[in-house]
Amino acid sequence: MIRKRSIFSVIACCLLALCFTTSNAQPTLTKDEFQQMLDSWNFKLNQAETELLKRGATEPLLVSIRRDVKKIQEQTAEVAKTSAERASRVRALLEALGPPPAEGAPPEEESVARRRGQLQEELAMFEGRVKQAELTAERARQLIERQSARLRQRAAEELFYRQPSPVSWSVLSSAGPHFLSALRQLARAPLEAWAPAISGGDLTAALPLPLAIALAFVIGWPLRRWLIRRYIRDRETERPTYTRRVVTAVMVGVSRGAIPALLAAAPLAVLLARGTSRGIVGDMLVAALIGVIAVVLTSGIARAALAPASPAIWRLTPLTDKSARALYRRIRQVMVIAATLFLIEFPARRHLYISEELRIFYSFVGDTVLAVFIFALLPKRLWQTAEATEIDGTKRPAPMDWKIQALRGAVAVTAIAIPVSSLLGFITFASYLTNNLLLTGLVLGGFVIFHGLVRELLTIALEREEAERVPVEDTEEERDSSGTLLRFWLVAAFDFALLLAATSLLLWAWGFGIADFKEWTRLLIGGFKIGKFTISLTDILIAVFVFVAILFATRMLQRVLENRIFPKTRLDLGVRHSLKTSIGYIGLVIAAAIAISALGLDLSNIAIIAGALSVGIGFGLQNVVNNFVSGLILLVERPVKVGDWVEVGAHQGYVKRINVRATELQTFQRSSVIIPNSELLSSSVVNWTHKDTLARVDVSVGVSYGSDIELVRDTLLHCAKNHPNCISEPSPFVLFLNFGDSSLDFDLRFYVARADEMFRTGSDVRFAIVRAFREKGIEIPFPQRDLHVRTVVEGMMAPRLNNPGSGGKDLK
């Protein structure tokens, strides 16, 4: 209960904040100040446009122009917003004054006319500022688009710049000697850097690095060993639970990947802190440590997901043992090759002279080798699942999903394009494909792994929480529903955040600039216009939040009324249901209205649209609207309410629920009958419990003509009064109805307090009447009938008597 109150309080505070938050009032600019600001904007935009027209504009200059123009765009948006608010206030004041006097009417008072003129001048001024600011903002937006186009054009020119082929003689003849020279310099660099320090005995500068390594190993290595021993994939375990498999996989990833990566990150942080003073050897160590971190992280994650050295029962993926081991080996090989190439390239590029020919040849070799190993990850045999289908007596692997087939095809085409592009001289494009293909694979793999991991961890945590904390009054269905709903929204929120992060990283990797991404994000959050309508993610999220919060508050109010307030009142079940349903409808209408207002929609436009659609609604949805209105009438007029025992046509039972379109009736056979609300208003309905639950029971009985009718009356009344359900007021009575053919007919009539007991009570009284009549000798006669069959028999026998030959046989 405390948790529910806390949630309700938070939602109430958020709603109050949304309702009472106002924008900070901006000081009103004078006419001269606004004109100076407008002239400054136009001057800066003219300068930016002039710079963009120059062909030799560098990339830093283009970025600087974008930054300045972006600032102008933000300023114009703020001024336009403030001026629009001022214009709205002035317009409201003019509406309060009312329209000016019509032609021929008496003139209005002088002070009112003077005030009207001042307000009209202010309105014209603010509306003019809005238009000028919007015009300047549009010009700034166009300049930003031109700047983005120039940057994309420069990037495309650099990306598709054609250089000499890496296998041409000019490149090979120069790249070979330079490559060998670079390798010799890299090999001699550690000796040249460390020999003086070793011979001179001055090792103080190198102490932080081994100390960092030693400290990291002292702390991290025992933890790694303990995790490996604690969370081992035991081969003797026949069927581990899914929870245990997930937890073990996480611990394997931490012990095999995260902890070794952190051990390597400690000395890397020490080296990076030195900056440019670390020299070529320091950069070689930086490259080596970065390569080690990449290899161990990738290997740890792959080992956790694929379990290559463990039984298939521990594997989270459905791959076969052979496919898992081969795929794990290929992934490690790709990362080792990439780390080795980076180990050579990073220090050489920063400290050695690299000729253009050597750069071309080295890029070709590195990109081609990586492309070959990436292509080696694509064979179908590496992605075979353990599920197999038996066809013609032989087991065949399960067919691969079409999405995986399409992804394999795209990666294969890209891997083939890498060496082809490099051979044709597009070295930059080949490196672009290689780097981004590796990064895309890492991002997608991490996305899939983290998606599945977090989903299962949330499932485990929520199931444990539900098991530990279950309210006594909650049913099993409610617990399952709430847990499933909470898990769905948590997983959906995490997936959205993870997808947004992965998409942002991939867009940045494939050439979309940070500035472009920020602009898209700003447009998405701040809003963009389509015609006269502005679509804003912020407004949509606020509208959804307000709608859900008001609905949640409505449901909470309904629960409080049903569980706490109604039980303390004497209202019957029907009144409670009507009030509860009415509050639900009112809350839904309020939530929809506030959400529409938060979106910025004009309700007058919605009214116009609703009016245009009213004809179609009248014809196409006539029955739906009729049933909806009938449902409202049932809730207000309450001729039928929840809990009533009613008869509608051939159906009778209890009213269980009155919905928007139909009413649910539960029959005595426990079946549900859905009756449209309009039928309850347009047809005759027998309501046994409309005003009260009092009901009369009629018991008819006949006695023989020789019976004592006074004794019969007293016996009937005695049987009725002795039943506990028979009430004394109105009192039971007996009617002598008729002289029947074979009996004297009586009716015993008595009342019961609850109509649903009338059938059972009537049956009990009939049993009692039979017993009492037997004890007192009162006879209940059978129907007496005189059947005259003599003439019929003589008529049938006459033909046979006239024919003696057949008479004997016929008589027999």
Image (tube, helix red, strand yellow):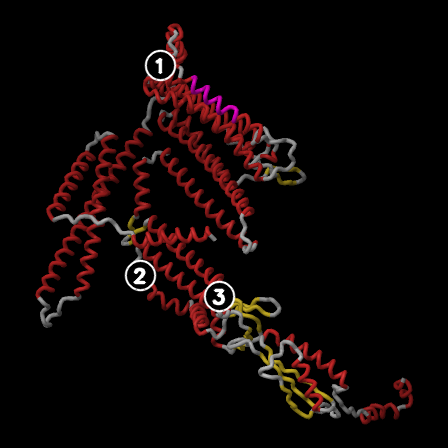
Q: Which mark is residue 174?
A: 1
Foreground pick, 540 / 230: 230
Q: Position of residue 704 (x, y in %)?
A: 74, 90
Magenta range: 210-223
Kindly report the secondary structure that dominates the magenta region of the rendered protein: helix
- How many residues crowd mark 3 within 10 Å: few (<14), some (14–19), many (20+)? few
Taking the spot 64% from the left edge, 87% from the top edge, the residue there is 734
Residue that label 2 marks: 603
With 64 as the anchor, is 279 left or right in this view?
right
Q: Which residue is mark 3?
A: 568
Query: What residue appears at the point 14 percent right and 66 percent down from the top-left corner?
Result: 100
Q: Quadrant of residue 381?
A: top right
Dot 2 falls on a residue whose secondary structure is: helix
Q: Amino acid at mark 1?
A: Ser
Residue 219 included in the magenta stretch of the image: yes
Whether 622 is drawn above or below 247: the answer is below
The image shows residue 637, relative to residue 458, as above or below, that is below
Left or right of 432 in this view: 791: right
Residue 542 visible in the current orientation: yes
- Mark 3 residue type: Lys
| Count of numbered circles on the image | 3
Q: Residues within 10 Å of mark 2 (few under 14, many from 20)?
A: few
Does residue 676 appear in the picture of this structure? no
Q: Is residue 571 magenta?
A: no
